[in-house]
């Protein structure tokens, strides 16, 4: 049943903390004035396997986006680096953002997948076509997911979701070949 759902997916949306990261948030002191919002910098770690999955999704014709409650410059920079089409930060009501993205893309809910890890993600997971929970998600979230990733958040879970969708759509091998040809230098014909 979840493979049939995956065949319809044209948009993959993700939570950030606990999905694209392991959920750990580091606060590093900065040179800002003490007591101001600029006296610390938020730092997060991202997995390179997950990063490559955004290229694979793009090659498969799947658009991507993030919907997260926190606001972070680190996330903004990572999203720009990965060419993520929809970036919604500081969002307490993720379902409203989900519906707005669907409207912008002219898609139906069943054409969107969402990857979550905590209860704030449940409203979107209940309304999308394919709901993923990362391996280390809260039990309530796993109970409502269509698919649970093999890997934990921040350790390749996004890659699991992308590969699951592309495999169901029969395009994973083609996307990997295209990715490799884009990232492999061609040999000089004159040698």
Image (cartoon, helix red, strand yellow):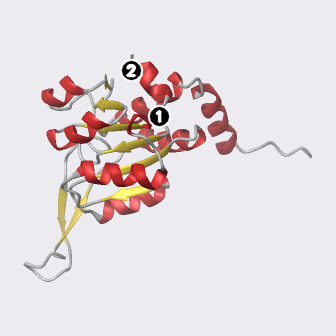
Left or right of residue 25: residue 153: right
For disc 1, the neighbor class at 10 Å (few under 14, some 14 to 19, many from 20) is many
Left or right of residue 114: residue 85: right
Q: What's the distance in space between the residues labelled 1 and 2, CA to CA?
A: 11 Å
Pick the residue in front: 101 or 133: 101
Looking at the rendered structure, which numbered label has been put on residue 172? none
Q: Quadrant of residue 37?
A: bottom left
Vertical side of 77 occupied by 68: above or below? above
Report helix, strand or loop for mark 2: helix
Vertical side of 170 occupied by 155: above or below? below
- Give the residue displayed 89% in from the left and 44% down from the top: 189
Vertical side of 189 occupied by 34: above or below? below
- The extreme left residue here reads 35
- The extreme right residue here reads 190
Q: Quadrant of the C terminus?
A: top right
- Give the residue displayed 47% in from the left and 29% down from the top: 165
Residue topped by disc 1? 9
Q: Quadrant of residue 72?
A: bottom left
Question: Residue 27's spot in the image, x, y percent?
Answer: 17, 61
Question: Residue 33's spot in the image, x, y percent?
Answer: 14, 83
Residue topped by disc 2? 2
């Amino acid at each position: 049943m979840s493979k049939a759902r995956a065949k319809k997916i044209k948009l993959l949306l993700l939570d950030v903390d606990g999905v694209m990261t392991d959920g750990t948030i580091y606060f590093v002191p900065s040179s800002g004035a003490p007591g101001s919002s600029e006296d610390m910098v938020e730092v997060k770690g991202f997995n390179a396997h997950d990063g490559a999955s955004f290229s694979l999704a793009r090659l498969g014709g799947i658009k991507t986006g993030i919907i997260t409650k926190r606001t972070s410059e680190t996330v903004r920079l990572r999203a720009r680096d990965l060419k993520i089409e929809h970036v919604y930060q500081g969002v307490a009501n993720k379902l409203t953002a989900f519906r707005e993205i669907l409207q912008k893309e002219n898609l139906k809910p069943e054409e969107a997948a969402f990857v979550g890890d905590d209860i704030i993600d449940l409203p979107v997971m209940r309304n999308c076509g394919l709901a993923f929970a990362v391996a280390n998600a809260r039990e309530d979230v796993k109970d409502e997911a269509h698919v649970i990733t093999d890997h934990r958040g921040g350790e390749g879970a996004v890659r699991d979701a992308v590969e699951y969708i592309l495999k169901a759509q029969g395009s994973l091998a083609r996307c990997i070949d295209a990715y490799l040809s884009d990232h492999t230098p061609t040999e000089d014909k004159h040698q």
